[in-house]
Image: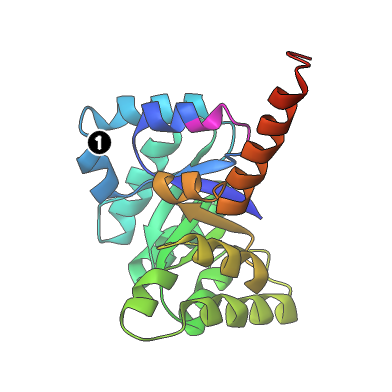
Amino acid sequence: MQIFLDTADAALISAHAETGLVDGVTTNPSLVAKAGGDFITGLTNICAAVDGPVSAEVVATDAATMIAEGQKLRTVADNIVVKLPLTFEGLKACAALTADGHPTNVTLCFSVAQALLAAKAGATFVSPFIGRLDDRGEDGLGLIQRIRAVYDEYGYETRILAASIRSVEHVEGSALAGADACTIPPAIFEKMIQHDLTDAGLAAFLKDWEASGRGAI
């Protein structure tokens, strides 16, 4: 499963990308507004920090303007993926941009029916928001499993990008449910490496090595 960072903070992306563990980035208007600065400059810096796909979202609500915005975003860098809302206008824009060879990410997916339409529109990625479903008592990870079953049954190539991640357990569950990728807030990405038994084991190893008097290797 690929790991994307869900942020528009270019400096943070660059720092985490140095691990070699980051496969891409997703942004949205809320994250871009939080990051501040010039939008295009920020996207350019993000695209330079990672080799993989960088989702940049349109802000129009009609298909024609979405297409125009998507085409403009694609001029920023080759790894830009045009992010579109899962509406009829968004799906129309998705089909048109896909036909012109532009990668797309259809976002705000909350049902199998929506994911099916995104696949039929030719979306490169579909982004089910599992955390928001869990927030209102629904089964977010179960949605990933059901979309996976439908896509596999009919041979759709649209990739499932698990989004709205609230915890490390959401990341693990997305992997087990068959997501192709998972977009993760940086704070949760950092928590993925943490385990108290790892810390305890390392401390014990280092204590024993120091007691042996062997010094540096």
Q: Amino acid at mark 1?
A: Ala
Q: Position of residue 161 (x, y in %)?
A: 54, 60
Q: Is residue 98 above or below residue 142?
A: above
Residue 27 at x, y = what percent?
A: 37, 46
Point out residue 205 in the picture as x, y percentages from the top left corner: 71, 36
Residue that appears at 45% across and 37% down? 74
Residue at the location (73% across, 82% down)?
A: 153
Residue 17 lies in magenta, yes or no? Answer: yes
Q: Is residue 105 magenta?
A: no
Q: Nearer the viewer, residue 67 or 161?
A: 161
How many other residues sit within 10 Å of disc 1, few (<14), some (14-19) or many (≥20)?
some
Task: Depth check: give the residue in front, 172 or 152.
Answer: 172
Q: Is residue 81 visible?
A: no
In the picture provided, is 40 more to the left or to the right than 79? left
Residue 197 sits above or below residue 46 on the image: below
Task: Please report the residue visible at 54 percent of the width from the left and 36 percent of the height from the top.
Answer: 79
User: Which span is picked out in magenta?
Assistant: 16-20
What secondary structure is the magenta-colored segment mainly?
loop
> Where the N terminus falls, by quadrant?
bottom right
Please, what secondary structure does the residue beneath circle 1 have?
helix
* Residue 88 can be seen in this image: yes
Please identify the quadrant where the C terminus is shown: top right
Position of 4 relative to 48 (above/below): below
